[in-house]
Image (spheres, helix red, strand yellow):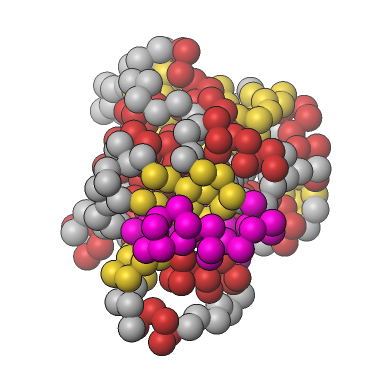
């Protein structure tokens, strides 16, 4: 748990007992998310809350009336728990549930030896082999939601701004969809190398080249068909529209708390469609977990560190730009 800004504590809590509709899961891996690092910096979380929401594990007990997934089965699960009743849930937009619970943010999280989870949010995995990558089903599903927000065809070109976990998840999904021309702009060399390994058609250092002219050259002067903003910075959100061609779509997946300056004339006169993406639906989570467990996307290059729980605090206080995804092993 995060006890104060800059402080992670490992505490003993009793192993919870599953109630109706719940499963007790022995956690195998839990990823450290950018949102966990942000909470670490600000200390802004309910007191004594267990953090973490990117997990895989083994079912060890079920509450009353539950039969699946059977104890012993490997699972991952969605961290956004929709109420299933509100106007957004009824439209299948449970990522916008008006009464959502979010694991590790408003409800007990999964960076723990044991976690209590609603069985309806669990997805079974075929075997132990996929447990490491399955902990990345959550960020992959965030990428999938972003990709699903726009129409993109194999012949289109895409530009991803930022090669952190979400940017690279979008890259993996676009490659899976058969989009050949996926360009990635990222200032950190280690992350650029991973983007190259994962099949980006061109990886660009935005500090070295004029990104604008580079994208122009790569697209025959047209600009990208779709721009995915995955950096969450005011500058990258501000410039995303101008890197797309006429009629392009821009999807903002990055979370940015500061005000952003946009050149609206440039957006309007070229009819740039601007949309945002937040979280994922339960259906998208299931699809993302399936893509990993069936080996249809390979997120292994994103896992840049696996640390035992005793060393987890160090991974919070010394994150580097080389790190993409650190998993805590239980
Ligand atoms: Zn996350
Ligand atoms: Zn709801």
Q: Residue at x 49, y 26 (%)?
A: 133
Does the magenta run of residues contain 219? yes
Query: What residue occupies the far bottom of the structure in this picture?
Result: 265
From the viewer's perspective, is 304 left or right of 225?
A: right
Say if residue 23 shows up in the picture: no
Q: Nearer the viewer, residue 277 or 68?
A: 277
Q: Residue at x 28, y 26 (%)?
A: 66
Image location of residue 101, percent across then percent down: 43, 53
List the single residue furthest toward the left.
91
Residue 249 on the magenta segment:
no
Q: Quadrant of the C terminus?
A: top right
Residue at image point 39% right, 52% down: 158
Q: Which residues are magenta?
A: 205-233
Q: In the figure, is residue 162 to the left or right of 305?
A: left
Query: Which quadrant of the view contains residue 318?
Result: top right
Foreground residue among 19 and 92: 92
**Quarter of the rendering occupied by the N terminus:** top right
Q: In the rendered view, tell whether residue 325 sits above or below residue 243.
A: above
- Relative side of 148 to 173, left or right: left
Image coordinates for residue 28, horizontal then vertical, percent? 56, 22
Q: Is residue 156 left or right of residue 40?
A: left
Along the line of sight, the residue nearer the viewer: 142 or 160: 160
Instruction: Pick the residue in front: 218 or 297.
Output: 218
Residue at 33% over, 41% down: 179
Q: Is residue 290 visible?
A: yes
Q: Position of residue 239 (x, y in %)?
A: 52, 71
Q: Is residue 282 placed above or below 76 in the rendered structure?
A: below
How many numbered marks have been drawn onto this rendered protein structure? 0
> Within the image, what quadrant is residue 313 found in?
top right
For residue 16, above or below residue 227: above
Examine the rendered structure and indicate whether residue 310 appears above or below residue 31. Answer: above
């Amino acid at each position: 748990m995060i006890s104060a800004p800059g402080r992670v504590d490992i505490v003993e809590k009793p192993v919870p007992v599953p109630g109706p509709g719940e499963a007790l899961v022995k956690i195998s891996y839990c990823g450290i998310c950018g949102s966990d690092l942000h909470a670490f910096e600000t200390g802004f979380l309910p007191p004594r809350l267990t953090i973490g929401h990117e997990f895989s594990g083994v079912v060890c007990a079920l509450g009353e009336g539950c039969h699946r997934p059977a104890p012993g089965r490997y699972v991952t699960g969605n961290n956004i728990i929709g109420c299933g009743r509100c106007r957004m849930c009824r439209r299948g937009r449970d990522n916008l549930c008006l009464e959502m619970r979010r694991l590790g943010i408003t409800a007990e999280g999964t960076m723990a030896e044991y976690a209590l989870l609603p069985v309806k949010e669990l997805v079974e995995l075929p075997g132990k082999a996929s447990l490491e990558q399955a902990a990345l089903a959550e960020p992959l599903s965030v990428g999938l939601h972003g990709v699903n927000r726009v129409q993109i065809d194999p012949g289109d070109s895409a530009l991803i701004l930022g090669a952190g976990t979400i940017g690279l998840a979008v890259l993996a999904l676009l490659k899976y969809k058969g989009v050949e021309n996926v360009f990635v702009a990222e200032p950190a060399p280690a992350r650029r190398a991973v983007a190259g390994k994962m099949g980006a058609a061109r990886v660009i250092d935005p500090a070295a080249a004029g990104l604008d002219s580079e994208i122009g050259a790569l697209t025959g002067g047209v600009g990208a068909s779709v721009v995915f903003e995955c950096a969450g910075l005011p500058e990258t959100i501000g410039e995303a529209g101008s890197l797309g061609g006429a009629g392009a779509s821009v999807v903002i997946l990055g979370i940015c708390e500061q005000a952003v300056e946009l050149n609206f004339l440039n957006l309007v006169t070229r009819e740039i469609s601007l949309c945002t993406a937040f979280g994922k639906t339960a259906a998208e989570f299931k699809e993302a977990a399936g893509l990993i467990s069936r080996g249809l996307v390979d997120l292994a290059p994103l896992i840049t560190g696996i640390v035992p729980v005793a060393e987890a605090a160090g991974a919070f206080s010394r994150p580097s730009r080389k790190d993409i995804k650190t998993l805590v092993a239980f």
